[in-house]
Amino acid sequence: MDFDAIVSTTEVFLKKYFVDTLKFSYVWAFSKDSQKIFLKVALAYFIGFLLLMGGIALPVFGTALLASSLPSGAVLALILGIVLAVLGIGILGYYGVLPIFNALNVRGYPQMDWTIPSFINFVLLKILSSIYAMLSVLNRRLWPLAAAEVLMLIAFLYAVFVMRPGAAAMLGLVFLFFFLSIPYLLLVVYNNTRQLAAAPIFLQGGKGKRQALEESWNLTRGKALPVFITDYGINFIWNTLVQVLMQMLQFFLMPLIWVGMLLGFLAPVVLYAFIIILLIVGSLLMAAFSAAFNFIMAFVLVGVYDGLVKYEKEKAGSALPGVARKSTDLKTLRPKRR
């Protein structure tokens, strides 16, 4: 491993694209087209949150109500709750990808037609990406580490539920499992970083799931460290800022909550109305914050991907002789047809 090359690549990449990606992460807030998409995503999140909360609450609170009037009321409440929860999660996932399309459009990349089958394929891509990362499918040199961790996990579970060994043997298995877990988790983080560009590659259309993962792996070769610093660093900055804003909002809303609780002691109807209003307002705020943070992460993702593409083009351009190094458009290097 050439550490000098890694340090050099990291320094060059961060100097060129970290600040650019950071600025790109909030450019959507000043675009009317992006603002319209943001409102659509926020509204979808609001509906999705309500359905999800209803799906969770219905089996808990609706069981007694339905059971009193129907013989199989508890089962019906559970089925309805699952249906509502699945619908909520589906809406959150389907509309949660729109910010990536918006970011691709801003950077001038093509986008695939977004349909239900496309959404299902994208979900399968995310599942396949997780499997690839956990089993280190594309990182064959370190595959034995992933295999050892999986075998160790199987041995640990077998020992717990089947063999039931003594304290010393169990302690040894636990020690070995956690000893392997530290480098294995680092391996999974590394693999996920290398596969980071698979989503924007896939959403442009024309690439299959495996092809998108392999192309991302090739695109990030030798650049895992700067990609990790840029993506996770900027997301950490924004996540910290969003958490601070939410804490400040909670601080200002707390007096209103206490007033509502006080009025509720005087009139129970007021308390019920206040709880409903609070749930609606809380869901709206949660939807707005979630949509905004999703936009930020999507624009950071596409910003990192765009930086990788530009970095590869610049590196290819610098390797060409003479006038080719001065060219800013690789299309001008193609021979003209006569």
Image: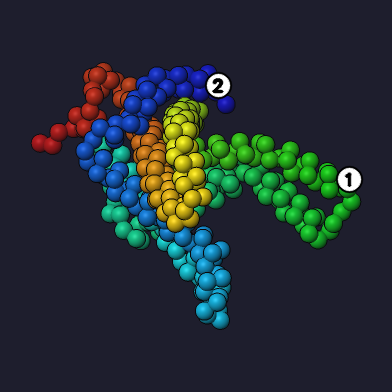
Instruction: Categorize mark 1 by other alpha carbons within 10 Å: few (<14), some (14-19), many (20+).
Output: few
On screen, residue 134 versus residue 286, left or right, reads right
* Amino acid residing under circle 1: Ala
* Vertical relation: 236 (above or below) 9: below
- Give the residue number, with chain letter if any, for mark 1: 168
Q: Does residue 78 show up? A: no
Q: Residue furthest left?
A: 338
SS label for mark 1: helix
Tell me the CA gap for discs 1 and 2. Answer: 42 Å
Q: Place residue 319 in its image quadrant.
A: top left
Mark earlier in primary sequence (1, 2): 2
Q: Residue furthest front?
A: 266
Please name the residue shown 21% across and 32% down the image: 331
* Amino acid residing under circle 2: Phe
Residue 27: mark in rendering = none
- Give the residue number, with chain letter if any, for mark 2: 3
* Vertical relation: 235 (above or below) 52: above
SS label for mark 2: helix
Q: Does residue 19 show up? A: yes
